[in-house]
Amino acid sequence: MKKLLILGAGTAGTMMANKMRKHLERDEWEITIVDQFKTHYYQPGFLFIPFGIYTKDDVIKPKSDFFPVGVNVIYSKIDKIQPEQNNVLLEDGVVLKYDYLIIATGCKTAPEEVDGLKDKLWYKEIFDFYTVEGASALADHFKTWKGGDLVVNISELPYKCPVAPLEFVFYADAFFTERGMRDKVNITYVTPMPGAFTKPRATKMLGELLEEKNIKLIPDFAIMEVNNDEKKIVDYGGTEVPFDCLVTIPPNMGDELISRSGMGDDMNYVPTDKHTLQSEKYENIFVIGDAANIPTSKAGSVAHFAADILEENLMCSIEGRPYTASFDGHANCYIETGYGKGTLIDFNYDTEPLPGSFPFPGLGPFGLLKVSRMNHYGKVMFRWIYWHILLKGKELPIDSEMQMAGKKL
Amino acid sequence: MTTKTIAGVNIEVNEEGYMIDSGQWTEEVAKEIAKEEGIELTDEHFKVLEYIRNKVASGETLTIRGINKSGVVDAKTFYKLFPGAPLKKATKIAGVRKPESCI
């Protein structure tokens, strides 16, 4: 029996287990997936928790609901990969052999990387919303909060779901307006980027939205520390921003197992060919999703598009053919802007987000870089699509390669 | 994209003055670009530039926190060496692409 081993059963790993089980004959290939946790989180839903729109129960399901028949599932911590020996060691000493390995161990927030972040105000007046615990604690805090300076700070790039912090401040504006206390809340968006976003057109559009909603933007801010006593964040250049409630996007890092295996960069991301998704060092190792160091967004949509590419290339490799699929860095993000509306961006390694319609040229129904009700419905519907279609590796009517049709230059 | 003569070499740069081909970089070119940014390069600057060039060549993302932890220079000194917007200036002088990320 040949062995395909998948590390990590999040969005990317689960999709790959479903896709590959369809291709590989059961009497020839054994597929095993390993993850330490039994719960699957619908991470795009975390954004809604602080504002009381979703609760914890809306974003969790057992991982076991999404594995296909014929895949071995092991719930265990992973100690390390020994890529030279084609071994993976689990925490309890079990050794798994593989012919092919897919690394899908993701990334996570590392608040301990910034001085003073995970300190005495943590989950009292400082929160993250990238964990279910942080998002729920913030929801509780907002219930009785009297207002003041609400500061949203991105520690550094890259971080998961680059648009989520913007959505957060748009939602905060609507939330406090609806509660009749917007005049008591100053919202400030503090980012290491030179503007609201990185690429010119989206930055302009989103920057204007911030202004329209009376959200102050402080760009080029590289956080050095959080001063818990004086309740302010300080950057390396000396700029200080006071807060009454700080919502942080901590630095993101790949899993420590990557570092234990000696396979990562400083941030524990695995060097990966950005087009083939093969590890740069090992022929029989592929990397998908947030675990890879490829220069695109860390987001489920990217993992989804990349999964189509990896499916094809892995089969090429197994059958000894040259690679036929090349990943273009395609990402597609709905951006909630509050009041039941949203916008949408679609981009890749080389093409910045452009205005237009999506997915059908001229028809939409979604508008790119436009604020509309339909875009909001897209995001709302997506949770259903995620659980029922995407994780199970089924086809969606969207090309994995970014399309220029329908876009305006 | 435009071509610019820097230290006697024709160099392709983007609209913001970042070099397109990192291979065209020399210490002389760096000194010229630094001058335009109002910086006189010292050995300490060059240590940082070398670190940045290596990082970018290996496909890693540059962050100020990362540089602070690198052992080459701490963040405070990095700001002193390249005042204002250190990452933007240092990458421009190092002849690598502007650190934009992934979004």
Image (cartoon, coloured by chain):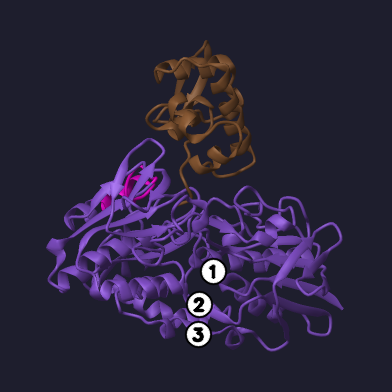
Chain colours: A purple, B brown
Q: Is residue A17 above or below residue A262?
A: below
- Are labels 3 and 2 assigned to the same chain? yes
Label 3 crowd bin: few (<14), some (14–19), many (20+), radius 10 Å: few
In the picture of the structure, the residue carrying the numbered disc 1 is A304
Of mark 2 and mark 1, the one earlier in the sequence is 2
Q: Quadrant of residue A44?
A: bottom left
Label 1 crowd bin: few (<14), some (14–19), many (20+), radius 10 Å: many
Residue furthest toward the top? B8
User: What SS does tag 2 mark?
Assistant: strand
Q: Quadrant of residue A306?
A: bottom right
In the picture of the structure, the residue carrying the numbered disc 2 is A41
Provide the chain ID for the residue under circle 1.
A
- Is residue A307 shown left or right of residue A24? left
Of mark 3 and mark 1, the one earlier in the sequence is 1
Q: Residue A388 — which label?
A: 3
Q: CA distance from mark 3 to mark 2?
A: 14 Å
User: What SS does tag 1 mark?
Assistant: helix
